Amino acid sequence: MKKILPAQAFRKLAHLYTEMQDLYQRHATALGLTCDGCTQNCCTSYFQHHTYIEWAYLIHGLHTLPEAERALYTERAQAYVHQATHDLASGQRPAIMCPVNNEGRCGMY
């Protein structure tokens, strides 16, 4: 099996994400779905599993951001982990806004 270099993997993943976003947007528009004013924000979903490449791509993206923005997201992520730990210990499924969300939109992509 041919080894895929990280840069190649990231390019392929970025292309896949672009295709997914384009298809989602096309169908969402046809159905009248929008993130604007949404009270059931997907960005509060509790994700427990990510693949290694998704994790690596997120870290890669964080390192491309200005230091102040990266520090803000890190601070939010620490608060997220604290709250999620508390919620889980209380027997509740966490419903916390994603640390990289800015005014209802993803700050990474």
Image (spheres, rainbow, N blue to C red):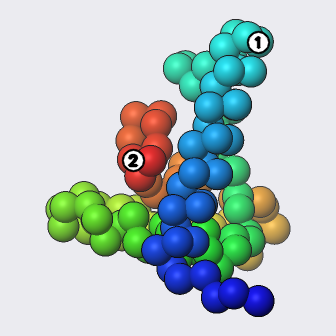
Residue 39 seen in the figure: no
Q: Nearer the viewer, residue 94 or 57?
A: 57
Q: Earlier in the sequence, mark 1 or mark 2?
A: 1
Q: Which residue is mark 2?
A: 107
Which image quadrant: the N terminus?
bottom right
Q: Give the amino acid at mark 1.
A: Leu
For the residue labelled by badge 2, is the local secondary structure a helix, a strand or a loop?
loop
Q: Residue at x 74, y 21 (%)?
A: 27
The x, y position of residue 70, in whole percent, is: 28, 65
Res. 53 in view = yes
**Picture coordinates of residue 77, whole percent (x, y):** 45, 67
Furthest-right residue in this view: 91
Q: Quadrant of residue 33?
A: top right
Residue occupying the point 73% across, 11% down: 30
Q: Is residue 13 left or right of residue 101?
A: right
Q: Which residue is mark 1?
A: 31
Residue 103 versus residue 2 in the image, above or below: above
Residue type at the position of mark 2: Gly
